[in-house]
Image (cartoon, helix red, strand yellow):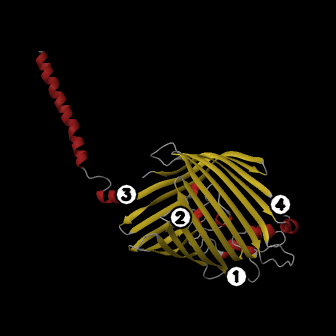
Amino acid sequence: MKNYFFYFALLLTSLFSFGQKQPQESIIKMPPIIPDSKITILKEVDVLFNTRMGFDNCFVDGDLMSSQFAVNQLRFEIKGKIHDKVYFRFRNRYTKIPDPTTIDNLSRAVDLAYLNIELTPKTKLTLGKMIGDWGGYELLINPIEILSYNVINDKSDNFQVGAAFTYSLEDRKNTFNFQVLNARTKTFQEQYGTTAPPGIVATKTPLSIVANWKGHLFDSKLETTYSAARFIDAENCNRNYLALGNKFKTGKLTLYYDFQYSNEDLDQKCVVSNIIKKQHPYAAQEVTYIDNWIRAEYKIQPKVDVLLTLMANNSYWNGNPDPNKSDCLATSYGIIPTMEYTPFSDLNLKFYVGYIAKKYNYSSYAQTQFNAVDYSSGQLSFGIIAPLLVL
């Protein structure tokens, strides 16, 4: 009798196993949800969340104003090849108010949205919204790595819609980039409104022309990004811009130095205009901004980096009609010491602590004529910096 029970149990086990096996085999034979051709494309595509978040402590003239957590940067990015000769990139910023009322019909929260087409091995054509190639290295570094910008880059529209043509020499050590972009994202009315000086009217061609040279010298120990640009801001009102970006790398040390010069017929940065606005209701004319920016990065241990950023700005009102004028109205200084710790060897995630100290000094003329008052600001931050690659 026991033998009958044994054979009966064996039969049931076999039938059960066969019943379980059949559906598994049928599932395996079904075609994949994502076809192989699409998987090949996905291998060339990166999806990132560029993130900086932490605990910020803000000070004005040494007094604590606030202590709170903040997501300082969150930019979703997707980029890669969709064809052997076509590359795309899209980046949206979630820490900026999405304003659709722009001249390019695209939200200002969108940093990048462009196609890069390889015409020949040495030439490329770029179409869409891209970074203006005028900012030196401060603007080219991933924004999550910059705790605070100097005046010119902080006050500029740095992402514009347009077209670019890039040419590389045979040695690939020298690249030339030519861009034709919109000069701004806002309309003339939005930018200046009632502050537009009498006689100054909107232009029909608010465009900018940019020429840039990127070089690698001395066995690539020295790299350069030198730019010259001209902006049409209004009828008979232009902006001339020059940037000299330098990067020197040796051993554990990387050193950056940017010089930036912006001469503006009509004040686009609005720093000077904000100083004089109580006595002059119109945007300032004939202004000049000069920036100097230095950043040093040193790896003291494989997982520990120390950084020091120094910056300075001079703001001039050359068009002041006062015969007793002082051209330089304001000077600002900044220093940002930072330490970063990377705990994982296979993940680009860093813990950081940094302090942003800035000092704003106004000339005696600005203090007397416009009631400008010197002040200082500070921000002590702890948090993480991570370009999180999720695909």
User: How far apart in space, not on screen, are marks 2 and 3 (Cα)?
Assistant: 35 Å
- Quarter of the image for the N terminus: give it: top left
Query: 107 left or right of 31?
Result: right
- Chain-order first, disc 4 or disc 3: 3
Q: Is residue 147 above or below residue 285?
A: above
- Identify residue for label 1: 201
Badge 4 element: loop
User: How far apart in space, not on screen, are marks 1 and 3 (Cα)?
Assistant: 49 Å
- Identify residue for label 2: 222
Of 311 and 368, the residue lying toward us? 311
Disc 4 marks a residue whose amino acid type is Val
- Identify residue for label 4: 373
- Chain-order first, disc 1 or disc 2: 1
Is there any visible trace of residue 98 in the rendered image?
Answer: no
Label 4 CA crowd tier, 10 Å (few <14, some 14–19, many 20+):
some
User: How far apart in space, not on screen, are marks 4 and 3 (Cα)?
Assistant: 55 Å
Q: Is residue 10 above or below residue 179?
A: above
- Chain-order first, disc 1 or disc 3: 3
- Identify residue for label 3: 42
Disc 1 marks a residue whose amino acid type is Val
